[in-house]
């Protein structure tokens, strides 16, 4: 969610959203409906003491997330590269503070412009989200061992757009989605 809210800040900023590290860094995803279904499923089919990681089959990385954000918000995205990312590792506390300072004002302005007066959403990024910590887990054990099936095996642009639209409908996100194109 923080990446989605940060992307909204870049709509207001009119700048390219650049992330640390590179496009290949993995950031597994799983649809919230699959999480809820898996928890319920495991009450009946789980093996006592079994460990079941949940991750869709998308092998999601920063590039895939950026492409989705580019499409639904019509922003440019990219990466800072090795040199700046390496420096960020040394001064991560400062980088986090700078990023949060940069994102908070445009997010607040967007919310005010669109009468979003009470939202739990924030572009605030915790330090752990900016560390070079690829997250790649295998979510297949729950399928293999218990018969669970993911309803959303891949992250798709139209599903992210739907989630954002639901937040817009709840009046907790500014109505800044771009018109539907070729949803994936």
Image: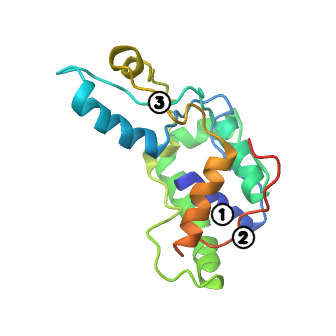
Q: Which residue is the site of mark 3?
A: 55
User: Residue placed at 82% from the left, 46% from the top?
Assistant: 182
Q: Is residue 50 left or right of residue 33?
A: left
Q: Hey, which quadrant is residue 153 in on the image?
A: top right
Q: Which residue is the site of mark 2?
A: 12
On-image quarter of the C terminus: top right
Crowd rating for badge 2 (residues with CA inside 10 Å; few <14, some 14–19, many 20+)? some
| As drawn, 91 above or below 41 | below
Does residue 99 appear in the picture of this structure?
Answer: yes
- The tag earlier along the polypeptide, 2 or 3, is 2
Give the image location of residue 70, x and y in percent.
Answer: 75, 50
User: Residue placed at 70% from the left, 36% from the top?
Assistant: 63
In 3D space, how far apart are the residues under numbered discs 3 and 1 (Cα atoms)?
25 Å
| As drawn, 152 above or below 16 | above
User: Which one is nearer the viewer's eye here, 122 or 125?
Assistant: 122
Marking on residue 8: 1
Q: Is residue 56 left or right of residue 147?
A: right
Q: Hey, which quadrant is residue 4 in on the image?
A: bottom right
Give the image location of residue 76, x and y in percent.
Answer: 79, 52
In 3D space, how far apart are the residues under numbered discs 2 and 3 (Cα atoms)?
32 Å
């Amino acid at each position: 969610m923080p990446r989605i809210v940060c992307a909204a800040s870049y709509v207001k900023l009119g700048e390219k959203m650049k992330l640390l590290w590179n496009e290949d860094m993995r950031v597994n995803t799983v649809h919230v409906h699959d999480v809820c279904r898996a928890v319920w499923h495991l009450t009946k089919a789980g093996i006592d003491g079994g460990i079941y990681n949940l991750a869709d089959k998308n092998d999601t990385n920063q590039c895939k997330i950026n492409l989705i954000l580019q499409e639904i918000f019509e922003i440019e995205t990219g990466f800072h590269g090795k040199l700046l990312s390496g420096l960020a590792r040394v001064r991560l506390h400062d980088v986090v503070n700078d990023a949060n300072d940069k994102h908070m004002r445009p997010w607040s302005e967007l919310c005010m412009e669109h009468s979003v007066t009470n939202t739990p959403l924030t572009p605030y990024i915790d330090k752990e989200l900016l560390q070079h910590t690829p997250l790649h887990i295998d979510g297949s054990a729950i399928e293999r061992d218990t018969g669970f099936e993911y309803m959303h095996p891949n992250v798709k642009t139209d599903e992210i757009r739907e989630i954002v639209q639901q937040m817009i409908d709840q009046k907790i996100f500014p109505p800044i989605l771009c018109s539907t194109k070729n949803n994936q």
